[in-house]
Image (cartoon, helix red, strand yellow):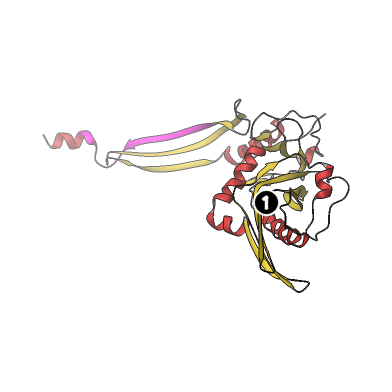
Amino acid sequence: MSQFDVALGMDETTLDQGIAGVFANPDANQKIFHGSTSGERHGVKYKVKWSLHESPTIDLTPPSDAEWTASIDVDGKKQTGSPPLHTFQLLCDSFTGKLTLAGAPVKGTAKVAVFAQAAIHGDTLTITPLSVWVDATPTGWNEAYIVTAIKMVLRQMGEMLAGIDIPPLSFTDEGVTISLTDPVLAITEGSTPRLVLAASLVSKGSVDIVGVTWPDKSLFLLFSDDLVQNVVDQVQDQLVGQETKGSGTKDKVLAYDYTAKVTSFSARQQNADKAKLDASVGFGLDANITAAGVCPISAATSNM
C-alpha cells in the first residue's frame, strides 16, 4: 500500500518552461548557451565555438543503450553498459559548432543530447549532467573538437539545470513546523512521464509511491489529510485563546472598550485544489459603550 504525506510532481512541459525562462534572459543566454575556447594540441593551434539558437527541451525518458554508449563524458570517454537510474535527456536540436584548426574553419549544426541524472541529497534534488551525445557529426568535427566542446557543454548545461527552481519539500513558516522524511524521487513512465518528489511525516515512517496514480496535471502538489490536520492543530494552538483589546471615543460622545477573543479554528482541504484550505475562525466579543464627557441631551438643551 502506498504511503506519502506530500508529493510534488511536474511534467516535461513545466520543466521546459523553466529552461525557456533561463534561455530568454539575455545575460544567462550569453553565459550558458554559448561557449568558446582556444588552445594548442600536438603543436597545432585551434579555436572552438558553439551556441544553441533554440531553448533546449526535456525528455524524461532515459536514452537507449546505444545512445548511452555512444555518448562522451567530460574526460572524453564513452559510456558503457546502460544509463543509471533516473537518467533523462536534455535535447538541443540546434547545436551549432565551429572549429578552426590550423586556420581552416569547419562549421556545422547537429542535434545534441545531454544525458543528466536526477538524485536526492538530503532534502534537496540535484541534477548532474553525465555525458553528451552528438547525432550525425558534421564532417571535419574531429575528436579533439568534440571532446573540447563537450566539456564546455556539460559545465554550462550543469549551471542551467541547477538554476531550475524545484523547491525542497519542507514546511517551516509562521510558527508551523512539519517534520518530514527525506523525499524519494521517481520519474514515472507512460505517455506523460513526470518527475515526482514525495515525503512522509517523520511520525509515519518511510515513503512508498509504487503504483500511485498521479493527477493528470503539468504541475501538482498533494497533501495528505494527516499533514493538513497537523498544520491545523498547530495553527489552532497558536490562535485559540488569543485576545485583542481596544478602546476609544466616537464623535466625542460615546466611549467604548472591547475584548475580542478567538474561540475556535477549523480548516479543510478544498475539493478543487487539495493544496489549499478553507478556514473558519470563531470569535467572542465583549464590548461596553458609555456616554463620554458632556451628556449629549444636556448639551443640545443648553443651546436652545
Q: Is residue 196 above or below residue 151?
A: above
- At a point 24% along the width and 40% down the height, the residue shown is 294
- At a point 39% along the width and 35% down the height, the residue shown is 288
Picture coordinates of residue 104 (x, y %)?
A: 67, 65
Q: Is mark 1 on a helix, strand or loop?
A: helix
In this picture, which residue range is highlighted in magenta?
281-297
Q: In this view, does 214 lie above or below 45?
A: above
Picture coordinates of residue 41 (x, y %)?
A: 76, 70
Predominant secondary structure in magenta? Answer: strand
Farthest residue, direction right: 81
Q: Is residue 233 visible?
A: yes
**Is 270 in front, or is 165?**
165
**Is 32 in front, or is 48?**
48
- At a point 62% along the width and 29% down the height, the residue shown is 269
Disc 1 designates what residue?
Answer: 161
Residue 75 sits in which quadrant? bottom right
Could you tell me which quadrant the N terminus lies in? Answer: top right
Does the magenta portion include 95? no
Picture coordinates of residue 162 (x, y %)?
A: 67, 53
